[in-house]
Each structure stands twice: as structure tokens, then as C-alpha cells.
Image: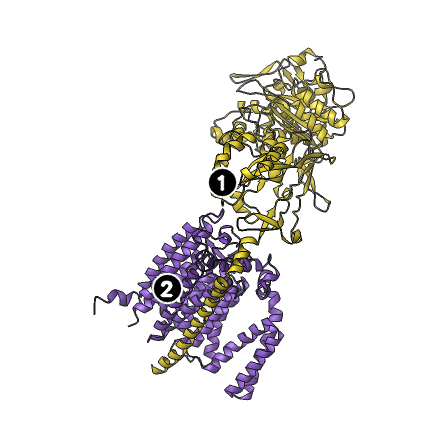
Chain colours: A purple, B yellow
Amino acid sequence: MKISHKIQDRFDLAIFIPVVFLIIIGLAAIYSSTINHPVAGGNFQRQLFWVFFSFTAMIIVYFLPSQTFRLLSAPIYVFSILLLIAVLVFGKSVYGARSWLSFGGVGFQPSEFAKIGLIFFLSYWFNQKNRNINNLKDVGVGLLIGLFPVMLILLEPDMGTAIIFIVITLALIFWNGISLFGLFIVIAPGFTFFASMLGVYYFYAALLLIIAVLFLFKRDLFLSAAIFGMNLATGFILKYALPLLQPHQQKRIESFVNPMADPLGAGYNALQARLAVGSGGLFGKGFMQGNQTQLRFIPEQWTDFIFCVIGEEFGFIGSILIIVLFTFLFLRLIKISSNLQNRFSSSLLVGIVTLLFTHFVINIGMNVGLMPVIGVPLPFLSYGGSSLLMIMMLIGVALNISKNKR
Amino acid sequence: MPIFKETYNLRKRIFTGIIVAVSFILSLQLFKMQILEYSFYDKRSKINSIKKIEVDAPRGVFFDRNMEMLVSNKPSFTLQIIPDKFDMTKIPLIENVIKVDSGYIKSILYKKRKYSKFVPRKIKRGISLKTIAWLEEQHEFLPGVNYVIELQRDYSFGIKGSHIFGYTKEITAARLKKYKGDYLRGDEAGASGLEMQYENLLRGIKGKKYIVVDSKRKTIGSYLNGERDVKPIKGNDLVLTLDKQTQQIAESLMVKRKGAIVAIEPATGEILAFVSAPEYDLSLFASITSGETLQKLFNNPDKALFNRATMSIYPPGSTVKMIAALAALEDNIVTKNWRINCGGGYQLGDRFFGCTHVHGKTNMVKSIEESCNTYYYQLILKLGIDRWSNFVSQFGFGRKTGIDIPEESGGILPDRKYFNKIYGKNRWTEGYLLNIVIGQGQFNVTPVQLAQYVSLLANNGRTKTPHFLRGYINRNGELHKTKYDDVIVDISTSSLDVIKTGMYDVVNKPEGTAFNIHMKELKIAGKTGTSQNPFGKDHSVFIAYAPFDNPKIAVAVVVENAGYGSATAAPIARDIITTYLLRKTVSPKYPVLINKTTEDNNEN
């Protein structure tokens, strides 16, 4: 045992340092966008408290014995499902979605906690002895584990979070060794569904593509026909599902197609966010100097639109720094996970990466106009206690796995 | 496990590929926006930003029962300062021009220091046109100073009604939190009286205005010529039960006096006139007044802000004697012919309870007419506290009437429970009852409770919760009437008739204690009272209703430190009744007191 290498070996600074930087930049952006705000003026201090609290939680998780995660998988999942049901009954509505529980004045989103439950339990389920991911029953149960909370979250309704659950479920199925054909069966309906959202011709194109792929796999005719039929059916979901969405969410999907068409309605935030980012230029307008931010053109900017504060005030340099830090963190976690002997731990890490990555893509994509406005926070940077706490606990898990990797 | 190692490698490469590709696409988009299209976004952000502004909705106005205007709105100029551009050295100049104390502007700016420096602070309302013209001229030298036209309450319709209407104030943090989303910081909301009670009816719905502003928040123009703007919707107009003319007279009768008047239509509970004196100037609250002026008002020794008609509690004096009489009749304790011999008082144990004079043989009607205390000393001893307090409670004493303004107190009804609590079980004697039966001691009532009590007597034990609101007129011009609960006392007509005869005689028989207000044109029934005041001169109390055969108005008048009920309160009640029923005021020179006994009548 070499003492000199101990700290470096055990505490993975390659994970920790980018996280610290992201949190510091996030605090600066929250400070800039809220400190002069009449209602949100205290948010910086509150976030500072949550940062300390979350770091403490991270350190506690870091020191937990490595078996803990496997043991806790099922209880965490079950508990988080109960919380999701509780929020539908007792929850309080914020912006049209019933997604908050309140404990003595402290708001808390059970769906954040449920993300941990999902990652843990799916990883656990796929890595039980005698589990075969290419067995229809096993993968079917895996899908159910993932889709049950999705259903509860859609009832809130919170589309952004539901999408994240779906992506995590698919990523874990993929990582845990599903065959290409299996993956195709799982993903194809989602693909067709998305195509049907874009229009009739996209939908036909998607169906043609599926027929082509089915030919390539050369499976028996009955199975191929069944898969095709399933995909055909998903095309009609939209027609019946869209009216189920909240009016503000329907509008958001429409405004994604053309945000300039309705600059005052649903496209307002997207347009103002893009103006903020674009007008930042190479070096930005300077800390606390962004007119879009300081004049509050973007409502609640400190939550889902925190990235455009950075884009406006720290410019291209600042924005790229964020992307580099995130990418570095993702690649580091993927690298560790692919070298692990323990498949459960490996799956956990991939779940964590997928979670962070999906948030990252949807949030920044929305801030720069590549994605519709879906309410998803940017990890480490957005204002919000339960989200930060959840993410830092997952970072604690990652550090813990990294510590025990040999 | 080599198989997994192998698939891991493939899958790792796929994950890595996706991550790198997506990060690259995001970077590319950032490069496109922030470097290539920078000048486009920069220009748009600087000169062309659409800003949503909330437009305040006018509050609903108040009408009286005949649709006469009581309170309305008027436009007024409000001076604003935007700290971002404001030159602090100009403060003394502006303070001088708008005629406020030095330090006034600074205190307002300090109070709102936490707001964004781009948000205008309202400094003073009701700025004169002359000052505005001067401001326009000096515009170049006064950066960050401007004005807006706002609607302000207009109280110029000849009545004060300060305790009825109440005032609005900048919304409190607590209310802002409670009605999250409905209000913005700086909004006005009702803070007392009807303005507070019916805030949700009065406030209307805010409008939206879209304007194009530059990065310094300077307005460039309206967006799309205002075609996307949403006009504010005015609040509902309230139709009150008040009668403007009667209210006016009632207010004028209480000028330079302290006390309260409540006049009610007995059958409906509709409040016809309502005064708490002294009044205060509601327009002081309508403008942003310096803290000093308000402080003076709050510390006023006469407590002008205090609503005496619903909050002050007074011993009702002899006006409540009829309750004991009714209780005795209803519970068959005595008949109306039961007589006592009044020798000027009553000896109970070692204490002597005095009467106003020697009344001699006295039956029930006479006991009311001449307000004989001795009769009731003896009656309450037969009646006992429980029967008595049960009836008092039925008439609504000892609890809030539920009148539709937020400020009300319930008074004190001393029953067995109350005495046990105050003195301890069995530590009080029947002697205590002798005081409360004639409306003194611990028995305390509010003027509005008294008015409800007279309504119940006048209308055979039936009325409704006293109220100001008849209904409201919504934005389509439809009148929505409001419904109110019944207030019912179960008493027989025969018992009531005895009492009413007594009350009729009070005003219309020469021996009656209020014969001074009798008149040919109108039959008024009433009862005098004197409310003992340990802190100074006694309060004058009078309750009345008219016409005697078909009551249309019931009045309770309390005048503080004005002596006997007949002297001050009774003529005031008479004037209110004649104004309402005959539409004329009897000349203010009251008839000379005819009966000498009435003059030095020391009724309690």
C-alpha cells in the first residue's frame, strides 16, 4: 500500500474538480440574476446553504460501505414511488404542475428523489443472477420499472422529467448488454412517435426506415410484422395524446417549431433567452452587466434559464467553459464505468451520466434554441435545493464507486 | 468476464461518441450565435425588446341605495423617481416643488432600496398640473424623474363615511404571499372597512400592455400599435344600503362630537346611516402621505381611526331594560300588570340601589316610560341571571353581529359563566344583577348591536344580519343581490306589544323621558339611556324606531360625555328619522323641554 498515492487514488479529483467549478459558476450566475430582484433577492443565500448541505450529503455518501447501494436499491425505488403517489394527492401546484411536496415550509420535488430510485433499482434488476437482458420477460419488467414512475410523473404533469426517466431507462437497457435487435425493438416506437410529432411525411419516412431495418435483421415474418404493427400504432398516439398535454405544454411544442411566430406567448422565453446568449459575444457583457438579465426580460431566469445568464455575461468563453467542464465529467464517468468489474456499479455510473447528460442537453439546447422549452434544470448551476441535493448525492455515489474500483 | 469487457468497449465508444457529438453541436450553435451572429443579437437586445407591463384596473365605485354616487375614482398625477438615472443632488429642489418636508424623498428611496434600481418609485400622488408643467420644462435637468397618471379615490360627493369605506394601502408582505400571483409588489389593496371586506369584488383584473424598450429601459413605442394589449377590467361597483341624505345628516349631527350612530331598516338589516365620530380624512390615505401625518392620525387622542360604531363597547344604560321585561313576560314570571311601589330605590342587604326619583306605584309600561330602576331591581331578583342572560343573548349581545366590515368587537354579556370566571364560583351575589339589568357595570355593547336590538323589537323579533352591501354591478351592468342570514328572536306578539306601548309612551306621553322629541307628523317609539362612564361625563344613549305602526327605520345613537339620553342623543335620532322618512330636517332648535321632571330626570 503506497501512502503517497492514497488520496489521489481514492478521492477522484477528476470528478470533483469540474463539479466544484460548475457550482461556483452557477452561484455567480444566480447572484447576478437575483440579488437585485424584489422577490427572489434571498435566493443566493438560500442556494449557498443548499450547496453546503449538498456537499455534506455527498461526503456522507462517499464514505458509505460499497454494499450499501445494492442493499438500498429496492427500498429507495419503492419509497420514491410512494412519494410520487403522495405528491399527486397532497402536492402543491407550481406553474400548472402538481410536483411539489412541502415539509414544514421546505419545498421538495419527489421526482428528483425518484431519479435516484430508478437508476439504482434498474441497475440492480438487470444485474441479478440468471437475468438475461435479451429475454423478452426480463427486458419487459425492466421497461415496466422505468415506465411506472413515468406514468405517475406524466400525471403531475411534468413532461421534462418524464423524458429524462425514459432516456435513463433506455440507456441502462442498452448498457446492460441488450442485443442490437432488442434495442431496436425498444427504441423504434419512440423514434416513430417523435417522427409523427414532426409531421405526416416524417412519420411515413420513419415507417419505411423501420421496414428497411427489419429486412436487415432477417427475423421471422410474424415477429417482423408484429413489430411493424406496433410502430404503426404509435403514430396514432400523438393524435390522442396531444390533447392530454397541458395547454402551456402544447404551446411550447408549437413554439419550438417557430418561436418568432408568437414573441409574446410561449416563444417569449425562448426568444429572450436566445437574445441574451447571442448578445453576449465572445467575452460577454461582464458580471452583473447583462441588460437582458438585469432588466429581467426572462422570468424565473435563475432556474431553467440560468445558462443564458452565463451566455450573456461571460460570453462564448464562459459558455464553452461550461460545456467543456460537463463533457470532461461525462467522459471521466464513462471511462470509470467501462473499467469496472462490478456490473452493478458500472450500471449505476452510466445511469448517473445519462441523468446528467440528458439534463445538460435539454437545458442548454433550450437556452440556445435547439430544443423546445421544457422545464428541466441545468445540473449544478440552476437554483433549486432538491435538485442540487439529489445530484450531489449521485456525485457522492460516483466518488464512492471510483474509490472502490480496485 | 471477457464478454462484458467486449460489449462495454463497444457501448462505451457509442456513449462517448454521443457525448462528444452533442457537446460539439452545442458548441457549434454557441459559436454561431455568439460569434457569427453576434451583431444581430446585439442589436436586437439593445434596441428592440418587448416588455410586458401590467396596467392597474380601476377599483369599483360605491353607490348608495338610490344609485347616488358615494365614492368614485379620479385621475391624478403621481411623481416617480427611477434611482438608476436620478441625480441625488436634486432632492432638495424637488422636495421644495412638491411641498414636502426635507428628508421625505430620501426616506421613500431608502424604504424601497431593495427593489431594482430600474424600477420607478412612486414619490407622491395628487401632484398639481402646474408642478407637472414645470417638470416637463425641466425634463432635461431632472434625469430619472417622471410622472404617471393614476386613478385615485375621489371622496368629493359630500359624505365622509371614513369608517364605512376604509382605505387602501400598498399591499402587505403577508397578503402578497397569501395571494401569490394575484398581486405585485406596490399594488394597492383594501386595508380597512368595505375596501378591505370586498377587496375581491372591487379590485378588477389587471390589463397588459406591450411596449418596445431599449436596453436602458427607455420606451421606444408600443408593440404592434397596441393590438396585443389587454385592457384592464374595472372592478365591480358596489351598491350599498346607505341612504346618502340620511348619512349626510347623521355625519353633520356628529361634527365636534364623539360617539356613533347606526340606523337600520328593521325588516332587512340594511344599514341606512352609519357614523363613528370623530371621522378622519380618507383622502389622506389616497395620496402617498408622509409618515408623520399618518403617525399623527394614529396617535390622535380622540382615536379618529377607531370605529366606534362596531368596536367601542359602552354600557347600554336603560335602553336594555326591555329585555328583562320581555323575559319576565315570556317565562311567565310576572304579568304586565305586576306592580311595585317605587320609593326612590331598593335596599338589598346592606346596599341601597337608587332610582332616579320616587315613581310610586309602577307597572311594566310605566317602568319603561319613566325608566324606573326600582321596578327592574325587583324584577331581576324574581327572574334570575340565567333567564335574563338567555334573552340578552338571543338579542345578539355578547357576540359579533357579523356586519360586513372587518373591524368588529362582540361586547361583553355577563352571564353565570362570566361571573364565575371573573369572581369565582359562589363568590358573587345577586346584588351584581341589579346593576347589569339596568345596563350598567360589566354589561357592554357596541352601537351596532344596539341597532340590531331595536330592529328586532321594532320588527317583531325578525331582522337580518346588519349589512352595507345590497349587491354589486358586474362589468356587464348586471346587479347581483347579496343574501343575508335571518336573525330571529322567538317572542310572542302580546309580550312585544307591552314593550312597544312603553316605548311609545317614552316619546309621546308628557311623563315620558324623551317627550322632548315628540312630534305630530310621525309616531316615534324609543328609549333613553345613560351610560355610566368612570372616566368622565356619562354617555348619552338613545334607541328609537319609526313609524310606530309600520317601522321603516331603527336607530341607535351614542354620544360620548353628553349626559342623559334625552338631552343629546334623542334629538339626533329624531333628526335622522325625519330626514329618512319625511325627507326634511326639523329645525335644529329643539322644542323647549316641556316637562320639568324630564329635565332633571336622572334615568340610568
The residue nearer to you, when weighing B577 against B11, is B11
Pointer 1 chain: B
Q: Residue A395: which disc?
A: 2
Residue A108, given in percent of the width and then of the height, sits at: 46, 56
Q: Say which quadrant the N terminus of chain A sits in.
A: bottom left
Q: Are marks 2 and 1 in contact (CB under 8 Å)?
A: no
Q: Residue furthest top?
A: B596
The residue nearer to you, when weighing B578 against A117, is A117
Question: Which residue has dot 1 on it?
Answer: B112
Residue B368: in sight, yes or no?
no
**Dot 2, how many residues are within 10 Å of its Cα: few (below 14), some (14-19), or many (20+)?**
many
Residue A240: image quadrant is bottom right
Question: As drawn, is A45 to the left or to the right of B571?
Answer: left
Task: Give the alpha-carbon distance from disc 2 to disc 1, as whole Å.
Answer: 42 Å
Q: Say which quadrant the C terminus of chain A sits in.
A: bottom left
Residue B50, given in percent of the width and then of the height, sits at: 58, 53
In this view, A44 is above or below B9: above
The kind of residue on which mark 2 rests is: Ile
In this view, B64 is above or below B6: above
Secondary element under disc 1, as helix, strand or loop, is loop
The residue nearer to you, when weighing A206 against A187, is A206
In this view, B70 is above or below A303: above
Residue A19, given in percent of the width and then of the height, sits at: 37, 62
